[in-house]
Image (spheres, rainbow, N blue to C red):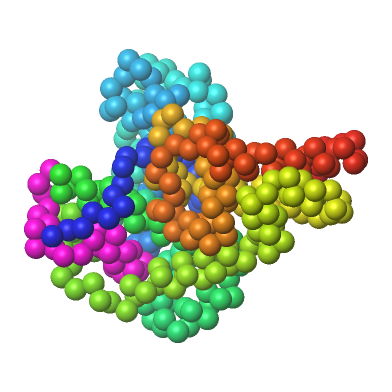
């Protein structure tokens, strides 16, 4: 029986991130010489085709959602508008994304664009070469797959490489892995609820399955995904050595964030929780640089939770950036061990809205006010960022 541990509570919309410059180069080539562009696409390897496909969709998908969609158009017509805008190149596309009121209507565009769409060329080339459709998955960066593939080849070397990675690099890997698992789990839950996948004979969790799929590596990931959702071929044995990749990186990430912020930072947080008056007296005794350092660490510790990986589990239409900020402060208030655990495991983020009136969140706001007041009282200026 499938174990739905920490199940996803909502299906987040796909949102735009940074798009690789190579997409705009290909589109620019298509606008100058479409046939030459087709030949260029034919020379690309499998991974490059998938990367271009998802970079394209990352921009084009905006036009299915507010504020870019045209309300009296169907999804299909809004989809057409998106294809046309992307096909005009980077400068024009950015102009429209910066000003949604400029989104054109179909009667204002040349409908010949339907005959020369980059995405159709990508589909045709991928189908001709591999006899299958391009995978309907989010594209994940080469650097991410390099780490996965290293773990498949040599777990010992992966562990050594992970120890040499910067703290931010570790967190970026964790976030990408989390997003990949989340995307799989959304599709899996939909397939189970529609009766397309039977889970009666399974005795492991959805998280175990998603971890296993991503751990198959750069090339086999797409095929594993397709085997499950097209052929309903579920894995029987999840004991592959590369299953340890996620745990190895997440464990190192947790270790790094246990030691950041600094010991001094956590001492002050613990003191404020035990006795706020003593905390206020203590900060009067620290020098200017220590005040600035504490304030900076507090901001950076909370800013971590603005990343998309946490929003996958915490986000709802009613949540604002302020709500995320309050939630981050609440996590910090729980102490360094809990903070490090949640940073390295985004799924552990509180799946409820935490109000600023919550005692722990309110304490963190009081701490910030005390720091700002102490600094401005001494220096008659705002504390530097």
Q: Nearer the viewer, residue 331 or 50?
A: 331
- Against 25, residue 335 (above or below) is below
Which portion, as a residue range, is magenta?
194-220
**Residue at the image point whose x is 43% and y is 76% from the top:** 150
**Residue at the image point whose x is 52% and y is 81% from the top:** 160
As for residue 211 lying within the magenta part, the answer is: yes
Res 366 seen here: yes
**Residue with the most extreme right position:** 379
Q: Nearer the viewer, residue 366 or 340?
A: 366
**Screen quadrant of the C terminus:** top right
Res 90 seen here: no
- Against 50, residue 66 (above or below) is above
**Screen quadrant of the N terminus:** bottom left
- Against 306, residue 68 (above or below) is above
**Residue at the image point whose x is 28% and y is 28% from the top:** 76
Task: Residue 329 in the image: state x and y as whole percent.
Answer: 58, 45
Q: Quadrant of residue 47?
A: bottom left
Q: Nearer the viewer, residue 90 or 110?
A: 90
Task: Residue 212 in the image: state x and y as whole percent.
Answer: 29, 67
**Residue at the image point whose x is 82% and y is 41% from the top:** 374
Task: Residue 226 in the image: state x and y as whole percent.
Answer: 21, 58
Image side of residue 300 versus residue 33, left or right: right
Q: Nearer the viewer, residue 326 or 22?
A: 326
Q: How many marks?
A: 0
As for residue 104 lying within the magenta part, the answer is: no
Task: Residue 28 in the image: state x and y as whole percent.
Answer: 50, 43
């Amino acid at each position: 029986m499938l174990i739905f541990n920490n199940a996803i509570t909502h299906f987040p919309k796909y949102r735009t991130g940074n798009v690789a410059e190579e997409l705009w180069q290909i589109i620019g080539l298509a606008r100058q010489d479409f046939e030459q562009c087709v030949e260029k696409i034919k020379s690309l390897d499998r991974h490059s085709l998938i990367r271009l496909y998802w970079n394209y969709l990352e921009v084009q998908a905006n036009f299915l959602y507010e504020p870019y969609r045209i309300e009296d158009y169907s999804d299909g017509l809004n989809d057409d508008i998106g294809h046309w805008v992307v096909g005009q190149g980077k400068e024009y596309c950015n102009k429209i994304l910066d000003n949604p009121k400029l989104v054109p209507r179909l009667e204002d565009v040349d409908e010949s664009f339907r005959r020369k769409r980059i995405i159709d060329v990508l589909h045709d080339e991928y189908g001709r070469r591999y006899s299958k459709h391009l995978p309907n998955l989010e594209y994940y960066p080469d650097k991410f797959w390099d780490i996965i593939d290293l773990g498949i080849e040599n777990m010992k070397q992966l562990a050594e490489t992970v120890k040499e990675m910067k703290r931010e690099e570790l967190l970026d890997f964790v976030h990408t892995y989390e997003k990949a698992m989340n995307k799989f789990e959304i599709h899996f839950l939909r397939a189970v609820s529609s009766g397309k996948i039977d889970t009666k004979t399974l005795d492991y969790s959805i998280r175990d399955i998603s971890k296993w799929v991503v751990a198959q590596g750069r090339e086999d990931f797409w095929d594993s995904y397709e085997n499950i959702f097209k052929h309903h071929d579920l894995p029987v044995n999840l004991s592959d050595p590369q299953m340890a990749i996620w745990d190895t990186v997440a464990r190192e990430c947790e270790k790094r964030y246990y030691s950041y912020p600094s010991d001094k930072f956590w001492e002050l947080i613990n003191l404020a929780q035990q006795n706020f008056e003593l905390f206020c007296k203590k900060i009067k005794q620290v020098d200017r640089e220590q005040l600035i350092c504490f304030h900076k660490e507090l901001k950076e510790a909370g800013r971590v939770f603005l990343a998309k990986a946490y929003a996958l589990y915490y986000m709802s239409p009613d949540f604002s950036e302020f709500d995320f900020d309050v939630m981050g402060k609440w996590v910090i208030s729980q102490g360094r061990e809990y903070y490090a655990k949640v940073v390295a495991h985004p799924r552990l983020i509180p799946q409820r809205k935490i109000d600023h009136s919550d005692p722990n969140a309110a304490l963190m706001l009081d701490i910030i006010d005390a720091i700002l007041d102490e600094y401005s009282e001494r220096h008659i200026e705002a504390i530097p960022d």
